[in-house]
Amino acid sequence: MKGTVKTACFVISGLLLAALLVSLPLFPSEALPADSPVSQKKNVAIVIDDFGNNMAGTAEIIELPFHLTIAVMPFQRTTKRDAEWAHHAGHDVFVHIPMEPISKNVKGLGKGAITTDLTDEEIRQRVNAAIDDVPHAVGVNNHMGSKATADRRVMRAVLQVCRDRGIAFLDSKTNRLSIAGEVAKELGVPYAENQLFLDNKNSSRYIQNQFERIYKHLSNKDSCVAIGHVGRPGKKTAAVLKKTLPELNKKANLVGVTQLFKLKNSPLPIIN
């Protein structure tokens, strides 16, 4: 009789323990430290190009309450206003330097464009002048530039200035054959590249669908850089951003491009 009672107690105890174990989470995330990789969100940098000419969407985008990177073209009528405005709104400011495309029409590039017929010294002078013209600039990215970014000599001259001025370079990736990343690594320049354009088509549905591509990219990557524009698609881009960024901000950290380097424990040099 005693043996039967002991056996029953043992069985009941085992069942209770099993039930307790089942009720416990396998991965008690609430016990993880705040800086645990498991608890960290992915990082998304939204870059908006073509500021500097008071183009459509300028105010709506700068006034969004999320950290963006605002790329301002130098030597334009609202260059300084837009750069100051973006800086005081808490955004990163980049210099959006016109660079030569593969197409032969370079007339529309504007003042200070980087073309492949320039000498190294002329390129360096133009990049320095462009940086000087955009207040609070912490980086450079290319406007067009499918030809220039594939030219090693040209990019070496451009990136030498970035190195000397202590600022980053973002390759807009208008040419898959761009060698900007290779040269930036050789020179030790903080570098990032665009993963997708948000508004190549002037369609709200298209822009919205591009955010699905961002989520897909983040499924196996830690970060994503995406570029949109003021101007022709500016109002639609601004409206989609206003609608979409609150939800994206719940799933990922919205950061400036320069923060991606800091998150990788490779801080930017001090800007002189």
Image: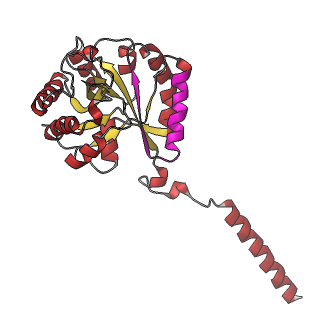
Does the magenta-highlighted stretch encompass residue 80? no
Percent from the top left, x then y, of residue 221? 47, 46
Q: Is residue 251 above or below residue 211?
A: below
224 horizontally vs 78: left or right: right
Q: What residue is rendered at 30% in x and 43% in y?
A: 181
Percent from the top left, x then y, of residue 197? 44, 28
- Res 204 visible: yes
The residue closer to the viewer here, 26 or 42, is 42
Q: What residue is rendered at 45% in x and 19% in y?
A: 237
The residue closer to the viewer here, 249 or 106, is 106
Percent from the top left, x then y, of residue 52? 27, 16
Q: How is the image coloured?
A: secondary structure
Does the magenta-highlighted stretch encompass residue 218? yes
Q: What residue is rendered at 20% in x and 23% in y?
A: 134
The residue closer to the viewer here, 236 or 107, is 107
Which segment is the magenta one? 206-230
5 horizontally vs 156: left or right: right
